[in-house]
Amino acid sequence: NKDPYGEGWIIKVKLSDASQVDALLSAQDYQKNIEK
């Protein structure tokens, strides 16, 4: 969890409803959210 953009890790996810991806936060939005 310390380096997801460097040496990080990979997962495979199977979505039951692909439209749910539209509700996910971008990395920038997530960062803003956790700074609150």
Image (cartoon, helix red, strand yellow):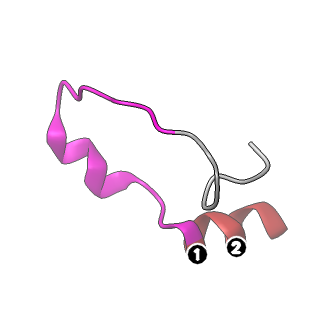
Q: Residue 30 in the image: x percent, y percent? A: 62, 63
Residue depicted at x 28% and y 49% = 21
Front position among marks 1 and 2:
1
Residue 36 visible in this rendered orientation of the protein: no
Tell me the element at label 1: helix
Q: In which quarter of the image is the C terminus?
A: bottom right
Residue 26 on the magenta span: yes
Three-letter residue code for mark 2:
Lys
Residue 17 on the magenta span: yes
Residue 19 visible in this rendered orientation of the protein: yes
Mark 2 Cα-neighbour bin, 10 Å: few <14, some 14–19, many ≥20 = few
Residue depicted at x 35% and y 30% = 12
Q: Do the residues labelled 1 and 2 touch (CB within 8 Å)?
A: yes
Secondary structure mostly seen in the magenta stretch: loop
User: Of the numbered discs in the image, which one, if any, rests on residue 32?
Assistant: 2
Say left or right for 15 vs 5: left
Residue depicted at x 23% and y 29% = 15
Q: Residue 24 in the image: x percent, y percent? A: 41, 53
Say left or right for 29 vs 16: right
Q: Name the residue under label 1.
A: 28
Say left or right for 31 vs 19: right
The CA span between labels 1 and 2 is 6 Å
Residue depicted at x 56% and y 40% = 9
- In this orientation, which residue lies closer to the viewer: 13 or 33? 13
Tell me the element at label 2: helix
Q: Residue 35 in the image: x percent, y percent? A: 82, 69
- In this orientation, which residue lies closer to the viewer: 2 or 29? 2
The magenta stretch is 10-27
Is residue 31 positioned above or below 19 on the image? below
Q: Which residue lies furthest to the front in this view?
A: 7
- In this orientation, which residue lies closer to the viewer: 11 or 15? 11
